[in-house]
Image (cartoon, rainbow, N blue to C red):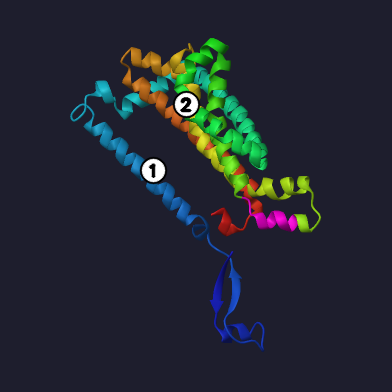
Amino acid sequence: MTEQLVTPPERETADAGTSGPVRIPVERTWWQRHGRTATVWGVRLLLIAVLLTAWEMTAGSLFDITFTSKPSDIAGRLGEWSGDGTLWQHSWVTIQEIVYGFLLGAAAGALAGFVLASLQLAYRVLDPFMMALYSIPKVALAPLFIVWFGIGMHMKVLLAAATVFFLVFLNTAAGVREVDRGLIDAVRLMGGNRRDIALKVVLPSSMTGVLTGLKVAIPYALIGAVIGELVASNQGLGYLINDAAAQFDTAGVFATLVVLSVIAGVLNVLVGLIGRRVNRWKPIEAQG
């Protein structure tokens, strides 16, 4: 619904005795409701089409297809792998590692961030240690995780979880520490206890930080799982990249990267839907 200004004479016929412009809701058309979104998606698709066409036309003339391949070859490899089941088998393995690692790391990070940020002394003591652990390149942890957990799925899940944990923890802690102190004082004045403050003020107000951490962590969950597969694995999309690269199959490498991009996009959409549902209590302006 939108609002339209109507002149006083028009309004007098509906409600005599009033003056000045009156706001009357009118029904919006489909284009008014979805036109901007449709335009954005149209421009995106056009940009992709232009880039792929330029790539296809210049491959072999300006670029050596041995190193860059071309869209038609990539599409052919995707079709070939889809037909024989290779793509679905390896994609399912990687999706499981990403989802399990993301859920485990996100749950642990959100819980640790919420609890520690609520305890001022504990947070000040542990903050430098958390930052030191966060600064360690996660690829450097892969050999250690192999020693601890072997080369099975558990290693990739835990590597992805370790990558996600710190991102969610830091964003959640920042969200908790930025809660409006006025709201906390107001609940205390109304007789609320620590439980009321935590559940009715701190938790809802910190959800923005939690959701930011979740969105940022999605590609890192994927990175953690694929790094584990690249280091040591005989299945998964990381293994498929290694195998294609060993055979100088550039089309296969790009095809796998396309699948990884699609998986990351789907996960981003899911987190976005969750974010809209969680943030329904906020004003429209605050939701952005």
Name which residue type carries label 2. Ile
* Residue occupying the point 41% across, 29% down: 258
Q: Quadrant of residue 267?
A: top right
Q: Does the magenta stretch include residue 180?
A: yes
Residue 273 at least partly seen: no
What is the magenta segment's predominant secondary structure?
helix
Percent x, y of residue 234? 48, 11
Mark 1 lies on a secondary structure that is helix
Tell me: residue 91, above or below residue 262: above
Q: Of the residues under marks 2 and 1, which one precedes in the sequence?
A: 1
Tell me: residue 217, above or below residue 146: below
| Mark 2 residue crowding within 10 angstroms, few (<14) / some (14–19) / many (20+) | few
Mark 2 lies on a secondary structure that is loop
Residues 251 and 107: in front is 107
Percent x, y of residue 243? 39, 13
Tell me: residue 43, above or below residue 284: above
Q: In which quarter of the image is residue 231?
A: top left
Residue 18 at least partly seen: yes
Q: Which residue lies furthest to the bottom in this view?
A: 17
* Quadrant showing the N terminus: bottom right
Q: Give the range drawn in magenta.
A: 179-187
Residue 82 placement, left or right of 95: left
* Residue occupying the point 49% across, 36% down: 265
State the residue position of label 1.
45
Which label belongs to residue 136? Answer: 2
Residues 102 and 15: in front is 102
How far is disc 2 from disc 1 in space, using C-alphas? Answer: 38 Å
Percent x, y of residue 172? 60, 41
Residues 81 and 90: in front is 90
| Mark 1 residue crowding within 10 angstroms, few (<14) / some (14–19) / many (20+) | few
Q: Does the magenta stretch include residue 143?
A: no
